Image (cartoon, rainbow, N blue to C red):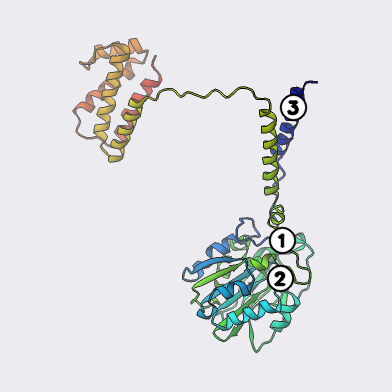
Amino acid sequence: MKRTTIYLIITIAILLLIAAFVLYQPTKTFDKKVTFSYKEPRPYATRICFTTLPLMFNNPKVIVNIKAPYEWMYEDSIKEGGRLLFIISKQFNPNKNDLDWMYSFVSNGNYIFISTFNINETAREYLKLDFDYNYSPTNDDDLYDSVKVKLIKPLYSHDSSYFNAGFTTEKYISKYDSTNFISLGLNHKNNPNFIKASVNNGAFFLHTDPFLFSNYFLLQKHNEEYYQKVLSAVPNNVTKIIWDDYFTYKKDDINYKSHAPLRILFQYPSFVWAISLAIGLFIIYLLIHVKRKQRFVSVIEGQKNDSLYFAETIGRLYFEKGDHINLAKKMAAYFLEHIRSKYLINTSQLNNELVSKISAKSGYSEEETHNIIQSIANIQVQDSIDQNQLNIYYTQFQNFYKHTL
């Protein structure tokens, strides 16, 4: 078997494989994947929250942080105050050093807002609180949905409840120091899910249901009010927001393993498909070009009709300027020139004889031809026309060009 035949068979096989992948359309279902990523529009991501967060204050500067607290707090003067560290994650797993830096951050007039349903033992002991649950989900499909949540006095003027049609959890704060913390919100079983602790001039906020900041929840009717009221608990002197992406991927220090960039990217099916398709196309390119002996013949473009392009440009300028009568006269002159050059008919007299000659040579209806000649006669004596009349003239001329020999 010739080598070219082998290449052809391999190429056809790869093309069929790619075609099968491209044509395969999986059944569309509701995307239940929970990421809380600020970059994604999927239901259980947080793009809306990230985008609108500055609007809840006086449009402060927003940065995304991927560093440990001691790294960015050392670089950014925490003594200036007015900064908000905003954390939305499946887990919050700081070590003792992280918590010391965060406490110092709050003590200097800054704020930390954390919404998570998994908090490690180190943080629970440090904050002197504990989590509990009536039910512990093992994966995203086991999460509760369709429940009500509440915001309560004394911070809010009256108790108010909001309906969550999407995922939620049974996590709540079962134990906290009431001398330092106050309860601001409750879950559907009237257990605390949102608390606040004031530390010197700053404040620490802990929320146990990050699903209430997801795209899906915020797009439900009236739920933007819940979002606004929760953030109204944070003082309005915020001048800088630090959206934290560090704790999204941080594991407990006991079993922490670093995430290589490619390992994270390969978690996304779309990225895997893109890489696979790129490799497949590269292989096809090599197979097709390995035996190519002749250079491609370059395409020589035909000459452009510069006069037509010029006429179109001038016409567009007249139209945008609103000089409709001038543009109509240009179209009429172009039409008569077209008759003279194509059909060799004298157009000096706009009469019935001219109509008969044009209709006979062009094959166009004598009645329609008469209407065009009458329109040209009107154009030559008019001082102004409106846009609707200009459209009528334009349509008459274009119909003639399209339907004549």
In which quadrant of the rendered image does the N terminus lie? top right
What x and y, as percent, mark residue 31? 69, 54
Q: Which is closer to the viewer, label 2 or label 3?
A: 3
Percent coordinates x, y for residue 182 in the rendering: 63, 84
Task: Look at label 2 and name its amino acid.
Answer: Phe
Q: Going 72% across and 45% down the picture, which residue do you hit?
A: 27
Q: Residue at x 74, y 75 (%)?
A: 120
Q: Secondary structure at mark 2?
A: loop
Image side of residue 193 versus residue 302, left or right: right
- Residue 117 is tagged as 2
Task: Tell me the quadrant of the picture where the C terminus can be found.
Answer: top left
| 158 is higher (above) or lower (below) than 392 | below
The residue tagged with tag 1: helix, strand or loop?
Answer: loop
Mark number for residue 7?
3
The quadrant in which residue 138 appears is bottom right
* Cβ atoms under marks 1 and 2 closer than 8 Å: no
The residue at 32%/30% (across/down) is 310
Left or right of 308: which side holds 152?
right
Give the residue number, with chain letter if any, for mark 1: 259
